[in-house]
Amino acid sequence: DLTLDQIEDLRIAVVEACALLLGGRSHPGETLSTSFTIGDGALDVFITGPAAVPPDKSSFAWSVLNALVGKVETGSGAAGSWIRLTHLGGR
């Protein structure tokens, strides 16, 4: 039930999140992965990448992510950092 504009916003947000998780450089032999989950009126996109440090929440790129989707979260784990983008229905 997404409009074309919402789909385009999500596409841009996923590309931006992937770029943040690569940290502006190549990572030979490392993996960037994305999963999409639909349920309970929300679309959840979970992206993991090799950047050791989560993205800076005060950066311009983070502001762009917040403007494009309903909820943005980040963190880090043993395999690198992650970003979760959540589009809530009706936004």
Image (tube, rainbow, N blue to C red):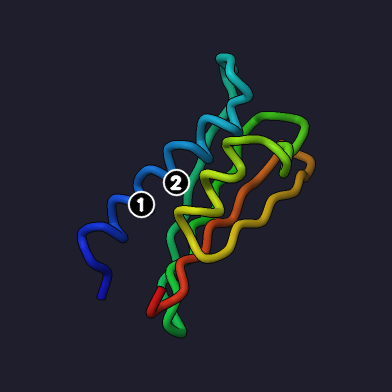
The image quadrant that residue 61 belongs to is top right
Q: Is residue 36 positioned above or below 2 on the image?
A: above
Q: At numbered mark 2, what does the secondary structure look like: helix, strand or loop?
A: helix
Reading the image, the residue beneath label 2 is 13
Label 2 CA crowd tier, 10 Å (few <14, some 14–19, many 20+): many
Which quadrant is the C terminus positioned in? bottom left
Q: At numbered mark 1, what does the secondary structure look like: helix, strand or loop?
A: helix
Reading the image, the residue beneath label 1 is 9
**Residue drawn at 61 percent across, 49 percent down:** 83
Left-right relation of 63 to 51: left
Give whichever of 35, 42 is nearer the camera.
42
**Residue drawn at 61 percent across, 43 percent down:** 62
What percent of the width, then of the height, locates residue 29? 57, 19
Distance between the alpha carbons at the discs numbered 2 and 1: 6 Å
What percent of the width, then of the height, locates residue 67? 50, 53
**Residue drawn at 46 percent across, 67 percent down:** 87
Q: Residue furthest bottom?
A: 40
Give whichever of 52, 63 is nearer the camera.
63
Query: Do the CB atoms of the residues marked 2 and 1 lie less than 8 Å apart?
Result: yes
The three-letter code of the residue at mark 2 reads Ala
Which circle marks residue 91 in the picture?
none
Q: Is residue 42 positioned above or below 5 on the image?
A: below
What percent of the width, then of the height, locates residue 52? 76, 30
Give whichever of 85, 68 is nearer the camera.
68
The three-letter code of the residue at mark 1 reads Asp
Left-right relation of 20 to 55: left
**Residue drawn at 58 percent across, 19 percent down:** 24
